Image: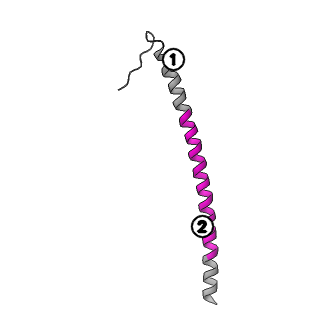
Amino acid sequence: KLDQKINTVHDKLDRKIDAVHDKLDQKIDAVGAELGRKIDAVAADLAAHRADTEAHPLLFSVQEK
């Protein structure tokens, strides 16, 4: 009888842990996707800025170190 109770509690705990793990994976994927979009937007802004400043060499100088 005690073995059955322990197994029941163990099974419930496993299900809860799996549910939390699944939600955590979903959140991590969502954050990763949003971060990827933001990085892409920053890269596009930087490329546009560089193209604009390099088009006006007398006013701006872009140097890499």
Where residue 29 appears, as percent x and y from the top left, is 58, 50
Taking the image as shown, residue 61 lies to the left or right of residue 12, namely left
Taking the image as shown, residue 54 lies to the left or right of residue 31, namely left
Q: Residue at x 60, y 67 (%)?
A: 17
What separation in Å lies between label 1 and label 2 (alpha carbons)?
52 Å
Mark on residue 6? none
Location of residue 4 with respect to 34 vertically, above or below: below
- For the C terminus, the quadrant is top left
Within 10 Å of disc 1 (Cα), the crowding (few <14, some 14-19, many 20+) is: few
Magenta stretch bounds:
11-40
- Say how many tags the image has: 2
Q: Residue at x 45, y 11 (%)?
A: 59
Q: Mark 2 points at which residue?
A: 17
Q: Residue at x 47, y 12 (%)?
A: 56
Mark on residue 52? 1
* Mark 2: amino acid: Ile
Location of residue 60 with respect to 48 vertically, above or below: above
Magenta-drawn stretch contains 36: yes
Where residue 64 appears, as percent x and y from the top left, is 37, 24
User: Toward the viewer: 44 or 27?
Assistant: 44
> Magenta span: helix, strand or loop, mainly?
helix
- For the N terminus, the quadrant is bottom right
